[in-house]
Amino acid sequence: MDPIGKYQIVKELGHGATSTVYLALDSFNGQQVALKLFNPMVMQNTGSGKAFRKLLLTEASLAGKLSHPHIVKIHDAVMEGEQNYMVMEYVEGETLERYAEVDHLLSLGRIAEIIYKCCKALEYAQYQGVIHRDIKPANILIKGESDIKISDFGAAMLENQQTTQVSGVGSPAYMSPEQIKELTLSHQTDIYSLGVTMYRMLTGKLPFEAANNYSMIYQIMNIEPPAASTFRPEIPPALDAIVQRAMCKDVAHRYQTWDEFARDLVSFISYEVPQQEQIFDTEKFDTVRALPFFTDFNDVELWEVLRISEWRKVPKEEKIVGEGEPGQKFYIVANGSVRIVKQGRLLSLLHKGDCFGEMAHLMGKDAKRSTDVFAKTDVKLIEIDPEVLALATANCRFQFAEAFLRMLTKRLAVANTRISRLLSDHGDEQ
């Protein structure tokens, strides 16, 4: 197939009534992208073409605006002439549709983790002035266990946009009551739609089953759905309550913020999901956001920390690093306490949020560990390899450098205080 703009077409990924999606190669940087080529007949249709073009222009306007690890990036868009297309990040995976079917339901813990990541991504979009308006399983891509990306922002509402929004967009089964009424929308309409998505993933069913859109709309407006546990008895009351609050018809009783929704999911995972060796990304993100070391990191940078780090649990009294050993990895205590020992003498205790091993990292490749480090209690550690950190974004690396500077300045101040006290005590003795 002939190139489209600067993009060399590799193969077709899928097609529908309005567009065909191709895997393409950016000839400038060799990057794989997904190129969505729109059907010219749809664009030229006098009835629906104008509304469809407005939706496309809305999505195209987000190019470069939404940069989040759980949102599909829009790289480029051409909306003029005979070839109209959009170029997006290529995600090698599938949508959540398959996992919203009865025969392919995921575990409760994985569903909670996926919905949590959606909450954080949509919270980020809200801060950028964007409301999605069409959240559903088909618009959420998944790769691996729970690496998700939200796509298809064509129906999005942009705050402070001067042009009139297209009404009637969205998928009826996932629409909030206020969206059906065409009232002024806020992020709470996305909270409702994500609640419906969660219900579908938990049960394989929509909260309302209807033969046509009119019946569906009536039920959304007037009927309370059965609890998700009606169809999946192992769903505990805490998870039932989360879904019901997200789908509450009255916005005053629905989750007011994405953070409220996300925190209830964290609580469910922490207390209701059986503990396992693997640490959920939900728990990791909630942990790093609370640690002083990461105070100045924004959410996007925190997700990057999760991507470049290894997390491990170390039992009480186990040696973590040994004096004289080579190694540049550094560690942040996510939970528990560690003992720093020099030639058998206890130098200090480090607790949740403290960092160790950074001096070997800062001194370079030939550095060796200057102390032993033992787990004083059962410990959860964040382990970071400098070689992996070197591949992180400039912003993320800058935040680590700043965090090291703050930490070393604080340690120097403590050391100076100790020296001053020792000198003072020595002077008094004389």
Image (cartoon, helix red, strand yellow):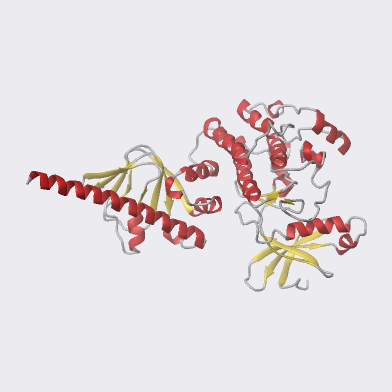
Position above or below: 27 against 87: below
Q: Quadrant of residue 193?
A: top right
Q: Residue at x 50, y 37 (%)?
A: 276
Relative image position of residue 139 (x, y in whole percent): 72, 49
Front residue of this view, candidates 302 and 321: 302
Q: Quadrant of residue 350?
A: top left
Q: Residue at x 35, y 64 (%)?
A: 365
Front residue of this view, candidates 298 and 162: 162
Q: Quadrant of the N terminus?
A: bottom right
Relative image position of residue 52 (x, y in whole percent): 84, 56
Relative image position of residue 208 (x, y in whole percent): 79, 32
Position above or below: 31 against 68: below
Front residue of this view, candidates 251 and 318: 251
State whether residue 214 appears in this view.
yes
Relative image position of residue 69 (x, y in whole percent): 60, 53
For residue 185, side relative to residue 126 (left or right): right
Q: Residue at x 62, y 35 (%)?
A: 108
State whether residue 15 appears in this view.
no
Q: How many marks?
A: 0
For residue 185, side relative to residue 297 (left or right): right
Front residue of this view, candidates 224 and 330: 224
Position above or below: 274 against 399: above
**Residue at the extreme right:** 46
